[in-house]
Image (cartoon, rainbow, N blue to C red):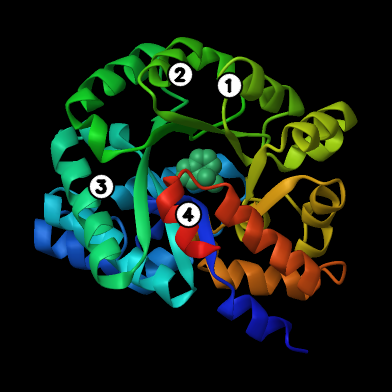
Amino acid sequence: SALPALIERLPKAELHLHIEGSLEPELIFALAQRNGVALPYASVEALRAAYAFTDLQSFLDIYYAGASVLLQEQDFFDMAWAYLLRAQADQVVRAELFFDPQTHTERGVPFEVVIRGLHRACRQAQASLGVSADLILCFLRHLSEEEALATLQQALPYRDLFIGVGLDSAERGHPPEKFARVFAQARALGLHVVAHAGEEGPPAYVWSALDVLQVERIDHGVRSVEDPALMDRLAAQGVPLTVCPLSNLKLCVVRDLADHPLPTLLAAGLKATINADDPAYFGGYLNDNWRATFAALPQLGPAQAYALARHSLEATFAPPEVQAAWV
Ligand code: ES4
Ligand code: ZN
């Protein structure tokens, strides 16, 4: 059928992409060499062989270890530039990149080094690739709200270099309401707000992300299918869900892509989108996610492909004049 060709040519937005999760093993080794960082793996192949995850935490341990090679502004630029080139090849016209400053400031890398390198790549993507790109600062939910508040304070001099805040890392035991004050401050600053919820955590975490954090989008949200009242709320309010099928498969959130709830979310009228999450770790970039998902789920056809692409463009935080160029 023409479905694979349609998937490849549709313009789309990527709204759930951890830039540290785009760090390929080859670049990890190159940066380790450039920076004199010792890695506990002998080769690119040995590192990639360690990418066998049983749950979110087993992934996060390796993901934070991989990020330890990032030290200089140029390292952050190189990582983001490699991703943005890859995104352009997948017809991504808009990318909103998550970054985890605490993973780096904890190791002594200044916040300014992180954000300046990432932001320079975003600016260059607009100028020379025609890809609109912006940054969303994520707080690590396994750390305290005091640490998140200190990170937001550190970010204030760079307020114009990022468009919003998010919440990621280990979900279970760290509900959204733990971060009520820091999200209220972010909203008061005019920042956009999103949060991971309902990936491994229960539907109650999606409710509190909406009601306490007042998020504009839910990252993942797949466990919302367990709660009919929540499904009604998400549909009525038109809350976008940034779904990541290959991530859900690799982290054992679903047993098989054929069991993925994406068709259920779409049929219920939710504004679901497809995203890559951590493409270097989960076996694929954006169009790989699209292809694998459509191949596994016969309920998904051209109508769903158009809807998913449209949802992604409608759910961006791009200024209206930028959005106008896509419709
Ligand atoms: C993440 Cl898949 C996922 N879930 C939560 N936090 C994350 N950080 C990077 N990838
Ligand atoms: Zn994520």
The verdict on label 2 being within 8 Å of ligand 1 is no
Mark toward the start of the polypeptide (4 vs 3): 3
Q: Tell me, yes or no, if residue 102 can be seen here.
A: yes
Q: Residue at x 77, y 61 (%)?
A: 256
The quadrant where residue 273 appears: bottom right
- Determine which of the numbered discs, if any, sits on residue 68 in the image: 3
* Residue behind mark 4: 323
| Amino acid, disc 3 | Ser
Mark toward the start of the polypeptide (2 vs 3): 3
Can you say which quadrant of the picture contains the C terminus?
Answer: bottom right
Estimate the spatial distance between the alpha carbons at disc 2 and disc 4, rounded to whole Å.
26 Å
- Determine which of the numbered discs, if any, sits on residue 214 in the image: 1
Q: Where does the image place residue 95, in percent across and percent down from the top left?
A: 43, 56
Q: Residues within 10 Å of mark 3 (few under 14, many from 20)?
A: some
- Circle 1 sits in a helix, a strand or a loop, which is it? loop
Q: Where does the image place residue 283, in percent across and percent down from the top left?
A: 54, 68
The quadrant where residue 79 appears: bottom left
Q: Nearer the viewer, mark 4 or mark 1?
A: 4
- Determine which of the numbered discs, if any, sits on residue 183 in the image: 2
Mark toward the start of the polypeptide (2 vs 4): 2
Estimate the spatial distance between the alpha carbons at disc 4 and disc 3, rounded to whole Å.
36 Å
Estimate the spatial distance between the alpha carbons at disc 4 and disc 1, rounded to whole Å.
23 Å
| Amino acid, disc 4 | Gln
Residues under numbered marks 2 and 1 in contact, where contact means CB atoms less than 8 Å apart = yes
Estimate the spatial distance between the alpha carbons at disc 2 and disc 1, rounded to whole Å.
8 Å
